[in-house]
Image: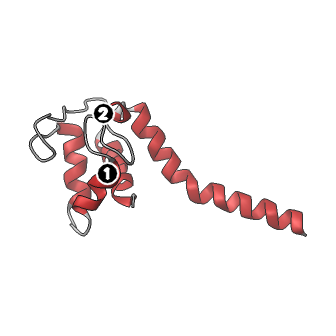
Amino acid sequence: MKKLLAITLTALAAIASTPAMADLKLATDKNCMTCHSVDKKVVGPGYKDIAAKYAGQKDAIDMLAGKIQKGGAGIWGPIPMPANAQVNAAESKTLATWVMSLK
């Protein structure tokens, strides 16, 4: 019985962490992690800083998804973020949703 409980809890933990890991993988696969980190500034701001800046803004996910695809400038300093042509609309929405979920 204890072994079954341990297996069940392990499986639930894996399921609960899978979306976060999958989206980190997507960010890595799409070269986002070249300029960003989850929790610190690299070239661009850390994702947790982005989530904190836009927390509570109802259009934050759509706005960020647009910036992922089209790029942007001036909000985080003088270095512009180039458009990421290898990210489609669905992927940019997934990445923006993930970023906004970070605390």
Q: Which SS class for mark 2? A: loop
Q: Which SS class for mark 1? A: helix
Taking the spot 17% from the left edge, 38% from the top edge, the residue there is 70
Q: Taking 101 as reference, is 16 left or right?
A: right
Location of mark 1 (residue)? 96
Question: Residue furthest toward the right?
Answer: 1
Q: Earlier in the sequence, mark 1 or mark 2?
A: 2
Q: Residues within 10 Å of mark 1 (few under 14, many from 20)?
A: many
> Residue 43: which quarter of the image?
top left
> In the rendered structure, which amino acid carries the disc numbered 2?
Cys
Quadrant location, the N terminus: bottom right
Taking the spot 16% from the left edge, 45% from the top edge, the residue there is 76
Q: How far across and down, in percent of the image, does residue 90 sit?
A: 33, 45
In this rendered view, identify the residue nearer to me: 37 or 5. Answer: 37
Q: Residues within 10 Å of mark 2 (few under 14, many from 20)?
A: few
Q: Vertical placement of 11 versus 21: above or below? A: below
Q: How far across and down, in percent of the image, does residue 7 sit?
A: 80, 59
Q: Nearer the viewer, mark 1 or mark 2?
A: 2
Q: How far across and down, in percent of the image, does residue 89 sit?
A: 28, 43
> Residue 17: which quarter of the image?
bottom right
Location of mark 2 (residue)? 35
Taking the spot 31% from the left edge, 29% from the top edge, the residue there is 86
Taking the spot 43% from the left edge, 39% from the top edge, the residue there is 26
Q: Vertical placement of 1 versus 7: above or below? A: below
> In the rendered structure, which amino acid carries the disc numbered 1?
Ala
> Residue 32: which quarter of the image?
top left
Quadrant location, the C terminus: bottom left
Q: How far across and down, in percent of the image, does residue 83 sit?
A: 20, 33
